[in-house]
């Protein structure tokens, strides 16, 4: 068994299984929200918090848990995180109230914050030769993308046959397999020279990231100028500013500020923020587009979105070899350009009645770009930090992903919503010929039925407008409201995707300008050479030690 423990690709297999439970959970819950609302009586606000409680805790704790894994041992951290996630999943499936489900989702966020940085830091400690590390990270990124794509499909299949709690119970067998496999085949590693815990850094990072992510989430629902949003962003600026100041002056920083002097670290993290900004925002629109505009079921929607993840997975696996030939700068920049082209294509051809092959083409082009971008960018982050700080590097990579995704849904969602309201507002005046041609008595009846609650439902989004349309007794009027809401939504989606195109284009130009052609090692920019030495880092039993890292 000891010999099996030394096989790095067996280790990679179980690391990917551990990661899969996190990536599945990112999207599988979305298709279960209507069933949860029905069985638990959850309001729209409740559903929002069922999703957001997990994101808030997950994003807020990533840096702290990554640093803790470096200190106590990454394998131990991974197994504890899997156990916590499994317990949280079981409790979520057995929830009898929305309050209980929100609390258990937050608890799952703790487990996820431990698991995700541990997977990438173990991988980095196991595959120390740069080319092998890049290829292993490509597989890691591919599995993460695949899980996101499989989530809606698996969720749709489960909900056709089982209770809504099945979307959480599916995590349990994956957790069991991961825990057993990690125990036997994954070697442990830690930062043997880790200083004492940076408690002020822990407090400032958790509270600062919590305030930032909370502000982003609430901005998407309450508006960017809402007082609670402004207060959250203000608190985040103060707390994260204090965190940066403290980390630059303390003798034992959790996140050494010198990392940001390395553009392989900073440039790649910025590229990942902007990539996830566009990815999560576009998937948020497309899932609604297929279900609410084109009338597909949750399962059919998941199947139509799956090619995006499959193509991104293949591109991610191939990206390591592309980066070996062309370098990190060209590969990441080229990937961002291709993704921006896919989003431009999607934004210009989006229509209520768009044929799926047109959308599929845009999805595949975007998937190629995303796959080429995320794996080399992740490898750039991990290759630019000392091996002893791999957990912190991984946590920073994961934090940027979460913040970018939340920001994309909030910002692009705001653009879409503003266009939707501008297009739907004339409908609420009842001055369209469809209404004015009706008999006076019928028009008065419709006008009297347009109560403030009904108008608010139409303004709330396409789903609310369609519910109102279904209750209108006059078929021509019902169809008009339904079609108007769909057209307004697609217009907003197209404009938001057009903005995302320019965000991706700006990210590409940024990558070409900032990212080094190859991954710059920490000692090249004044990093701590000793901390990067295998003599300081404990030997990882999964590969029997490791060669000195060279150029990436």
Image: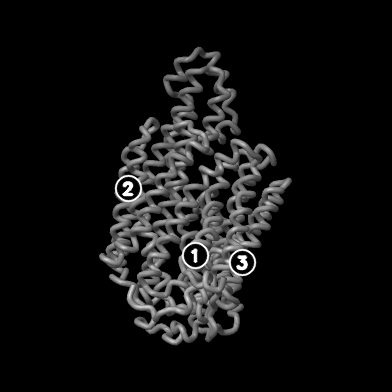
According to the picture, the residue beneath numbered tag 1 turns out to be 10
- Mark in the foreground, 1 or 2: 1
Question: From the viewer's perspective, is residue 477 above or below residue 542?
Answer: above
Q: In which quarter of the image is the N terminus?
A: bottom right
Q: Which element carries disc 2, helix, strand or loop?
A: helix
| Image location (x, y in percent) of residue 84 | 65, 62
Q: In percent of the image, x 59 and y 48: which residue is there?
A: 48
Q: Distance between the residues labelled 1 and 3?
A: 17 Å
Q: For residue 511, which quarter of the picture?
A: bottom left
Q: Which of 9 and 218 is in front in this view?
A: 9
Marked residue nearer the N-terminal end (1 or 3): 1
CB atoms of marks 3 and 2 within 8 Å: no
Label 1, residues with CA under 10 Å away: few <14, some 14-19, many ≥20: some
Q: How far apart are marks 1 and 2 (CA)?
A: 32 Å
| Image location (x, y in percent) of residue 448 | 59, 23
Q: Which element carries disc 1, helix, strand or loop?
A: helix
Q: In percent of the image, x 57 and y 47: which residue is there?
A: 29
Q: Can residue 483 be seen in this view?
A: yes
According to the picture, the residue beneath numbered tag 3 turns out to be 79
| Image location (x, y in percent) of residue 321 | 31, 63
Label 2, residues with CA under 10 Å away: few <14, some 14-19, many ≥20: many
Q: Quadrant of the C terminus?
A: bottom left
According to the picture, the residue beneath numbered tag 2 turns out to be 365
Marked residue nearer the N-terminal end (3 or 2): 3
CB atoms of marks 1 and 2 within 8 Å: no
């Amino acid at each position: 068994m000891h010999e099996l423990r030394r096989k790095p690709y067996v280790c990679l297999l179980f690391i990917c299984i551990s990661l899969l439970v996190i990536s599945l959970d990112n999207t599988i819950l979305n298709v279960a929200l209507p069933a949860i609302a029905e069985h638990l009586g959850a309001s729209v606000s409740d559903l929002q918090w069922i999703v957001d409680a997990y994101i808030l805790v997950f994003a807020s704790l990533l840096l702290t848990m990554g640093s803790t894994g470096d200190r106590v041992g990454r394998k131990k951290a991974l197994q504890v995180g899997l156990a916590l996630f499994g317990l949280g999943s079981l409790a979520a499936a057995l929830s009898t109230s929305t309050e209980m489900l929100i609390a258990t989702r937050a608890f799952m966020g703790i487990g996820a914050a431990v698991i995700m940085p541990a997977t990438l830091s173990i991988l980095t400690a196991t595959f120390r030769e740069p080319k092998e590390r890049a290829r292993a990270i490509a597989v890691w990124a591919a599995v993460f993308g695949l899980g996101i794509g499989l989530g809606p499909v698996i969720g749709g299949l489960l909900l056709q046959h089982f209770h809504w709690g099945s979307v959480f119970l599916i995590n349990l067998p994956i957790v069991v397999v991961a825990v057993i496999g990690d125990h036997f085949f994954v070697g442990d590693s830690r930062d043997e020279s880790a200083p004492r815990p940076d408690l002020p850094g822990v407090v400032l990072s958790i509270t600062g990231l919590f305030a930032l992510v909370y502000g982003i989430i609430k901005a998407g629902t309450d508006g960017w100028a809402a007082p609670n949003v402004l207060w959250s962003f203000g608190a985040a600026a103060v707390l994260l500013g204090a965190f940066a100041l403290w980390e630059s002056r303390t003798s034992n920083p959790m996140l050494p500020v010198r990392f940001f002097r390395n553009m392989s670290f900073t440039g790649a993290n910025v590229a990942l923020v902007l990539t996830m900004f566009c990815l999560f925002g576009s998937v948020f629109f497309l899932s609604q587009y297929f279900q609410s505009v084109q009338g597909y079921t949750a399962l059919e929607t998941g199947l139509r979105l799956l090619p995006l993840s499959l193509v991104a997975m293949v591109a991610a696996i191939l990206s390591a070899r592309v980066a070996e030939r062309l370098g990190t700068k060209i590969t990441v920049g080229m990937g961002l350009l291709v993704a921006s082209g896919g989003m431009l294509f999607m934004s210009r051809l989006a229509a209520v009645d768009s044929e799926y092959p047109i959308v599929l083409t845009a999805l595949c082009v975007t998937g190629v770009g995303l796959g080429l971008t995320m794996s080399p960018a992740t490898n750039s982050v991990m290759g630019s930090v000392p091996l002893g700080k791999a957990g912190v590097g991984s946590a920073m990579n994961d934090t940027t992903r979460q913040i970018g995704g939340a920001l994309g849904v909030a910002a692009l969602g705001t653009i879409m919503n503003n266009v939707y309201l501008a297009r739907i507002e004339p409908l609420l005046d009842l001055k369209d010929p469809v209404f004015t041609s009706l008999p006076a008595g019928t028009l008065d009846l419709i006008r009297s039925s347009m109560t403030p609650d009904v108008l608010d439902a139409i303004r709330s989004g396409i789903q609310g407008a369609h519910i109102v349309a279904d209750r209108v007794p006059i078929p021509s009027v019902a169809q008009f409201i339904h079609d108007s809401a769909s057209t307004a939504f697609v217009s907003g989606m197209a404009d938001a995707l057009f903005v995302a195109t320019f965000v991706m284009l700006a990210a590409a130009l940024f990558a070409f300008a900032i990212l080094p052609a190859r991954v710059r090692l920490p000692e090249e920019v004044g990093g701590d050479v000793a901390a990067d030495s295998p003599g300081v880092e404990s030997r990882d039993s999964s590969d029997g030690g490791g060669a000195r890292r060279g150029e990436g």
